Image (tube, rainbow, N blue to C red):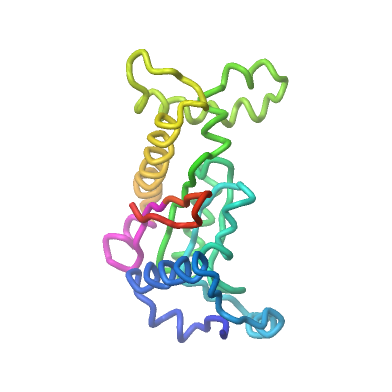
Amino acid sequence: MKAHTYETQSTITPDKAIQFLKEGNDRFINNMKYNRNLLTQVEDTREGQWPFATILSCIDSRTTVEHIFDQGLGDIFSIRIAGNFVNQDILGSMEFACNVAGSKLIVVLGHSKCGALKGGLDAHSIKDSGLDNLSSMVDKFEDKIQAVIKEDEDRSSKNACLLNRLNLHNIEHTVHEIKNLSPALQALSDEGKIKIVGANYDVETGVVSWL
């Protein structure tokens, strides 16, 4: 497998980019990954990079996007933060990826059993831990928790049903925020030059489901 060039990136549509990732995940779950010479790809990309997709995912060690989508050097921009949410710096990185570097797709990739979202559900215990920065981070999920929790429902990371609803809502909310907070990316989306989509990774099966 060769690394992408400006010419190959230019031929990729947003739908084709999604198809590349779907095919890569199929290879991953069937243990049929492409044979890549990574040192050759280092040589191929020494003058520049032309990734076809940008993926925002969690820092969870089980969700390395290059592996689960079977992609090589120079294929994707990978942005990682616990809980796969956006802030101004991440939006700026996405604008660089798409408006400057030509990426055709933004994927917000959540995952099952997310530790950051569990932390949001158990925020009371984190507040007492002395981990001030972690506490501040999980507080960002509070509005999303309130949007999905039912009256009298057990608010706990052990509530698997609630955690699953929160995960899917968090993905959809982040997709909406990207469009709402970045006019530049929204304009590219309106023009059909990029797509902004959500997906969910199952840490038990390796399967990516597309929202």
| Position of residue 207 in the picture relative to residue 75 (left or right) | left
Q: Is residue 173 above or below residue 100?
A: above
Name which quarter of the figure residue 116 lies in: top right
Task: Give the residue at x 38% y 35%.
Answer: 165
x, y percent for residue 205 = 49, 54
Task: Give the residue at x 44% y 52%.
Answer: 108
Q: How many marks?
A: 0
Q: Residue furthest top?
A: 152
Residue 81 among magenta residues: no
| Position of residue 166 in the picture relative to residue 79 (left or right) | left
Instruction: State which region is magenta.
Output: 185-199
x, y percent for residue 65 = 55, 60
Task: Give the residue at x 49% y 83%.
Answer: 6
Seen from the viewer's position, the closer of residues 95 and 146 is: 146
x, y percent for residue 183 = 36, 52
Seen from the viewer's position, the closer of residues 56 and 92 is: 56
| Position of residue 55 in the picture relative to residue 193 (left or right) | right
x, y percent for residue 60 = 61, 47
Task: Give the residue at x 52% y 49%.
Answer: 204
Q: Is residue 134 above or below residue 124?
A: below
Name which quarter of the figure residue 31 lies in: bottom right
Residue 193 among magenta residues: yes
| Position of residue 28 in the picture relative to residue 41 (left or right) | left
Q: Quadrant of the N terminus?
A: bottom right
Q: Is residue 103 above or below residue 44?
A: above
Seen from the viewer's position, the closer of residues 81 and 148 is: 148
Seen from the viewer's position, the closer of residues 188 and 160 is: 160
